[in-house]
Image (cartoon, rainbow, N blue to C red):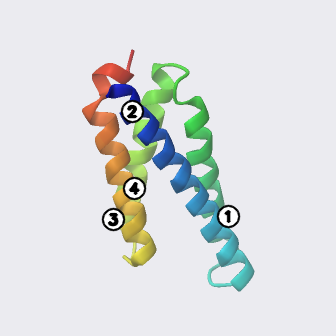
Amino acid sequence: MMKAAKNVFIILMAVQGVLWIAWSVFVLINHLQNPYIAMLMLGNGLVFLVSTLVYNRNRFFKSAVMGFVALNLILTLTDQMGLYDYIVLVLNIASLFLIVNNSRYWMR
């Protein structure tokens, strides 16, 4: 069960990374926001994707990923809430729940 939860967590992180990258490209193409905002969204997506690769390295990276997801959750809540924000909120809550609920097993 723990391994399945870990795989679900990695999939959630990868999905969120792809969503952030796709949304940033959409914003850049359609000039919906300042290009700097789109670059921040692109960076956020890249960090999510890199997190899926480095999560299993050691405790530092596991703690850093947990902090990153928590920070992303807080920033999502302080933003104007739209459909995309609610999707990201659910993904962040699910990811953080999996980390906290299985931290004893994963932090080895």
Circles 4, 2 touching at the beta carbon (< 8 Å): no
Q: Work out how far the residue at label 3 is from the one at label 2, CA to CA, in angstroms.
A: 28 Å
Taking the image as shown, residue 105 lies to the left or right of residue 61, namely left
Residue 51 shows in the view? yes
| Three-letter code for the amino acid on which mark 1 is drawn | Met
Quarter of the view holding residue 104: top left
Q: Which residue is mark 4?
A: 91
Residue 4's disc is 2
Q: Secondary structure at mark 2?
A: helix
Q: Work out how far the residue at label 4 is from the one at label 2, CA to CA, in angstroms.
A: 17 Å
Q: Which label lies toward us, 2 or 1? A: 2
| Three-letter code for the amino acid on which mark 2 is drawn | Ala
Residue located 56% across and 62% down the image: 19
Quadrant containing the C terminus in the rendered view: top left
Mark 3 crowdedness (10 Å alpha carbons): few <14, some 14-19, many ≥20: some
Q: Residue furthest left?
A: 101
Q: Is residue 106 above or below residue 46?
A: above
Q: Nearer the viewer, residue 35 or 11?
A: 11
Q: Residue furthest right?
A: 29
Residue 67: x, y in percent?
Answer: 41, 40
Q: Which label lies toward us, 3 or 2? A: 2
| Three-letter code for the amino acid on which mark 3 is drawn | Leu
> Which sits earlier in the primary sequence, circle 3 or circle 4?
3
Residue 77's disc is 3
Q: Nearer the viewer, residue 43 or 36?
A: 43
Q: Which label lies toward us, 4 or 1? A: 4
